Image (cartoon, grey):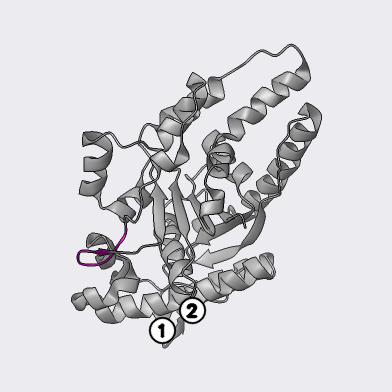
């Protein structure tokens, strides 16, 4: 059975998108008895998900010193007309579960800072076809690079989570083209939430545009719409077990605008996640985070609730 493929997107930076991608990936594995396999794909040239999963020093050692392949190489193979094995780019079992131990069923396909140049190069790329249909096929090729890379490995994984950059450029469009779902992480402030309607609208346009291009060009692509799973609030401040009033007002406002899309569960603000990141771990490893154990354990519990809700939405 092919993987569930989920894009994580918000055009506002600083909403904890990479942190949520990491924790949802590990959480989806931990919350199910059969321990499903998860692949994280980092599409952001800021490389935050790669750094969180590997640790900055380990990332620098693997990518810059030892020359491990990254997502940049997958895009370069398109420009050079060469084939590349996706499995050669994936780093297996990079995430520390506790000192000297790793989570067995979560892998990552890392990003590279040069991806920002790849996006510009893709935008400039023009191939001349003998017919308009052929030129449309060439345009489809530009947005199906990640789709084709995932096709090589999708049967090896149960879930694939793509951490998108905060834009709708061609690298991000590649992620949407490959996905059958998307999630919008947000924080309870105006700037974080103001673009949600626009994201939904643009996604509908992209779905329609991709389908028209496939139909017109006659391309043999098994495409399915990327459908929204919901909006997950992050960095929520609590007072007596509930969001503080200003945060609750924002969450309720978004909920009224986007019926049935806001997750009932949310992630609290606190030092558990940041301390875990500083130790190259997730909050699920709270037993190994003695100084922040209480807060990390609380955030882990909240994340487990989000994972349960996510699984219900995927299945239902």
Q: What element carries label 2?
A: helix
**Nearer-N-terminus badge (1/2):** 1
The quarter of the rendered structure image containing the N terminus is bottom right
Asked whether, in this view, residue 272 is left or right of residue 195, the answer is left
Q: Residue 52 carries which label?
A: none
Report the magenta residues as a range.
Answer: 95-101
What residue is disc 1 on?
Answer: 239
Tell me what residue is drawn at x 50 percent, y 57 percent: 192
115, 246: nearer the viewer = 115
In front: label 1 or label 2: 1
Q: Where is residue 101 in the image (x, y as percent from the top left)?
A: 25, 65
Q: Position of residue 235 (x, y in %)?
A: 41, 68
Q: In this view, does 91 lie above or below 27?
A: above
Q: Where is residue 72 in the image (x, y as percent from the top left)?
A: 41, 33
Tell me what residue is drawn at x 65 percent, y 26 percent: 139
**Can residue 115 be seen at all in this image of the molecule?**
no
């Amino acid at each position: 059975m092919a993987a569930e493929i989920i894009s994580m997107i918000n055009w506002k930076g600083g909403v904890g998108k990479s942190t949520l991608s990491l924790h949802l990936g590990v959480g989806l594995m931990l919350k199910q008895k059969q321990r499903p396999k998860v692949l994280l794909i980092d599409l952001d040239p800021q490389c935050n998900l790669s750094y969180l999963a590997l640790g900055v020093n380990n990332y620098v050692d693997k990518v810059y010193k030892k020359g491990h392949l990254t997502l940049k190489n997958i895009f370069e193979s398109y420009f050079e007309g060469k084939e590349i094995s996706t499995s050669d780019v994936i780093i297996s079992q990079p995430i520390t579960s506790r000192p000297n131990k790793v989570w067995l069923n979560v892998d990552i396909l890392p990003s590279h800072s040069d991806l920002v140049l790849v996006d510009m190069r893709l935008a400039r790329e023009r191939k001349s076809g003998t017919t308009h249909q052929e030129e449309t096929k060439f345009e489809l090729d530009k947005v199906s690079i990640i789709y084709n890379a995932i096709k090589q490995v999708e049967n090896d994984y149960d879930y694939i989570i793509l951490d998108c950059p905060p834009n709708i450029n061609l690298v991000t469009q590649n992620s949407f083209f490959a996905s059958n779902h998307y999630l919008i992480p947000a924080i309870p402030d105006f700037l974080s939430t103001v673009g949600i309607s626009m994201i939904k609208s643009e996604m509908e346009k992209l779905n329609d545009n991709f389908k028209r291009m496939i139909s017109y060009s006659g391309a043999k692509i098994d495409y399915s719409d990327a459908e929204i799973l919901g909006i997950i609030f992050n960095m929520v401040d609590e007072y007596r077990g509930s969001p503080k009033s200003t945060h609750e007002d924002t969450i309720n406002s978004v909920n009224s605008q986007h019926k049935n899309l806001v997750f009932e569960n949310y992630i609290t603000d606190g030092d558990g996640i940041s301390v875990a990141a500083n130790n190259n771990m997730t909050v699920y490893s709270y037993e190994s985070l003695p100084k922040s154990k209480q807060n990390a354990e609380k955030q882990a519990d909240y994340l487990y609730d989000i994972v349960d809700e996510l699984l219900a939405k995927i299945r239902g």
